[in-house]
Image (cartoon, rainbow, N blue to C red):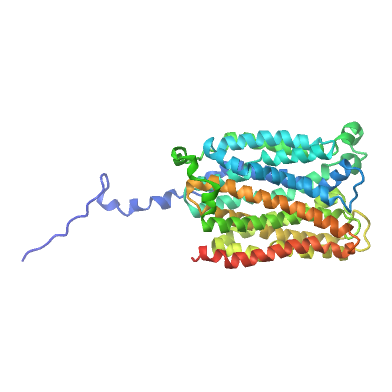
């Protein structure tokens, strides 16, 4: 009777016979989490906070700044100038966004951080010391053109994750979750500290430096912006690694262009989704303070009160963003989260003007508790939807291209977003100024027009996401 012996498995060199299973799970033991990138995340959060502050801090005071700079302007017709100043940031970024993406590929990711912080430091101080509308417009343009932070932050979020899609989503969500706190802090702080002579005539600063603050009433919010730039520059130097892939160095720069990226249907459709979303968000952000300061059809508020409302909405946004983003992504995935966010985003803007009915009988620059809570609830809920949409749409764009095209794609993404976010404030400014100061329509009804426009665009986004993007997310 013969016996056969099964051949022993061929073992890898240096592997003991009983160690195969033990050594087949290195990925589980070495899987990285957010804790492994705490300092990198800290630096990225500072970058996002700085960009948000530069973008929206002026919204609480720019209509009144325009009245200060232009003779004859009133709270009813300041919208046109305010829209132009707000839009110039994004117009400037439109001119430079793709260049920043190219620079990130050629020079590296960290040099883009350094240049953005240094240039933003300079131009925010110029904007804060503007003595006429032309300097304000031009400095705001260059402030936007010098800011390449969003593009490189998005790129670095993906590259730090090194192909781990779950980790990439968490890093992106955590970093851009700082937008919520930016929306909370920026308008509130800027509104409180702007024009101290008018708001706090008996304060130490007003009594000690009356001539200085009479000449530069809006310098303090921009000094805060300059301090953020310095903090960002230091944290980028200390904590951010250079993540530019080596394959980019060896690749001919002519291989990737706007045209080749745009030719990818998935990338193109996700970019359009992102652009529509940020257009709606920016339109709402510009229309809101114009509605707040209007004496007819609006709420007749001043900087500090406007900042209090915007910060209250920002608080709701910041808290709810961190409570909902990760559970939604875990339960519904990228596409499911995207669909939910379109249902509770900028389409809620049309509810905003109803606050006037809750504020009837109040004195100028005051809000009833019910009007305040209503505005905070509506705008806070809206921002949760648009904030999460900002992140998931960015993730969709990043995941639609190879890793060595992410920086160039984000340059294109910022180019289109800059245009739509420039058009948003201009359209909001003109439509609000016309609706509140027109002889053809009662301001009480006209106040609904700009918010109806943004809600209509957001409704189109719902149909776009549910129909157009479905083909790319079958899983």
User: Is residue 358 in view?
Assistant: no
Q: Position of residue 336 (x, y in %)?
A: 57, 65
* Vertical side of 385 occupied by 99: above or below: above
Name the foreground residue: 250 vs 217: 250
Name the foreground residue: 310 vs 1: 310
* Vertical side of 294 occupied by 469: above or below: below
* Vertical side of 312 occupied by 2: above or below: below
Q: Position of residue 229 (x, y in %)?
A: 68, 37
Which residue sits at x=84%, y=63%? 355
* Vertical side of 256 occupied by 265: above or below: below
The quarter of the rendered structure image containing the N terminus is: bottom left
User: Is residue 44 in view?
Assistant: yes
Q: Residue furthest left?
A: 1
Tally of marks: 0
Q: Position of residue 72 (x, y in %)?
A: 92, 46
Horizontal side, residue 272 vs residue 475: left or right:
right
Q: Quadrant of residue 102?
A: top right
Which residue sits at x=72%, y=52%? 423
Q: Quadrant of residue 131?
A: top right
């Amino acid at each position: 009777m013969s016996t056969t012996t099964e051949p022993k498995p061929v073992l890898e060199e240096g592997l003991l016979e009983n160690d195969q299973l033990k050594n087949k799970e290195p990925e589980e033991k070495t899987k990285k989490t957010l804790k492994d990138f705490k300092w990198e995340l800290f630096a990225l959060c500072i970058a996002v906070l700085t960009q948000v502050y530069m973008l929206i801090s002026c919204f609480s005071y720019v209509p009144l700044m325009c009245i200060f700079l232009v003779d004859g302007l009133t709270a009813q017709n300041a919208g046109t100038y305010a829209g132009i100043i707000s839009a110039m940031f994004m117009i400037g970024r439109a001119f430079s966004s793709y260049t920043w993406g190219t620079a990130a590929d050629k020079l590296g990711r960290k040099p883009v951080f350094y240049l953005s912080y240094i240039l933003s430091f300079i131009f925010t101080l110029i904007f804060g010391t503007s003595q006429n509308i032309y300097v304000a417009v031009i400095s705001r343009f260059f402030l936007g053109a010098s800011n390449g932070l969003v593009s490189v932050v998005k790129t670095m979020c993906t590259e730090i994750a090194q192909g781990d899609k779950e980790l990439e989503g968490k890093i992106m969500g955590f970093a851009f979750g700082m937008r919520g706190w930016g929306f909370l802090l920026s308008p509130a702080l800027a509104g409180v500290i702007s024009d101290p002579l008018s708001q706090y005539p008996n304060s130490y600063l007003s009594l000690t430096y009356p001539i200085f603050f009479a000449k530069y009433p809006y310098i303090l919010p921009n000094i805060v912006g300059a301090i953020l730039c310095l903090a960002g520059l230091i944290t980028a130097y200390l904590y951010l690694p250079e993540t530019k892939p080596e394959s980019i160095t060896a690749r001919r720069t002519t291989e990737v262009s706007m045209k080749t990226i745009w030719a990818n249907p998935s990338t193109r459709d996700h970019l359009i989704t992102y652009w529509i979303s940020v257009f709606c968000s920016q339109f709402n952000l510009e229309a809101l303070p114009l509605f707040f300061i209007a004496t007819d059809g609006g709420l007749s508020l001043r900087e500090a009160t406007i900042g209090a409302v915007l910060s209250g909405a920002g608080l709701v946004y910041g808290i709810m963003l961190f409570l909902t983003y990760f559970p939604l992504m875990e339960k519904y995935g990228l596409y499911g989260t995207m669909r939910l966010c379109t249902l509770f985003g900028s389409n809620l803007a049309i509810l905003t003007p109803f606050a006037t009915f809750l504020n009837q009988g109040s004195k100028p620059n005051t809000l009833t508790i019910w009007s305040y809570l209503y505005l905070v609830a509506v705008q806070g809920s809206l921002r949760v939807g648009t904030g999460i949409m900002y992140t998931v749409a960015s993730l969709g764009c990043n995941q639609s291209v190879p890793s060595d095209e992410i920086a160039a794609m984000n340059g294109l993404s910022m180019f289109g977003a800059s245009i739509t976010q420039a058009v948003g404030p201009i359209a909001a400014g003109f439509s609000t100024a016309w609706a509140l100061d027109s002889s053809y329509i009662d301001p009480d009804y006209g106040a609904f027009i700009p918010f109806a426009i943004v809600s209509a665009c957001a409704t189109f986004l719902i149909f776009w996401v549910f129909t157009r993007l479905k083909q790319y997310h079958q899983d």
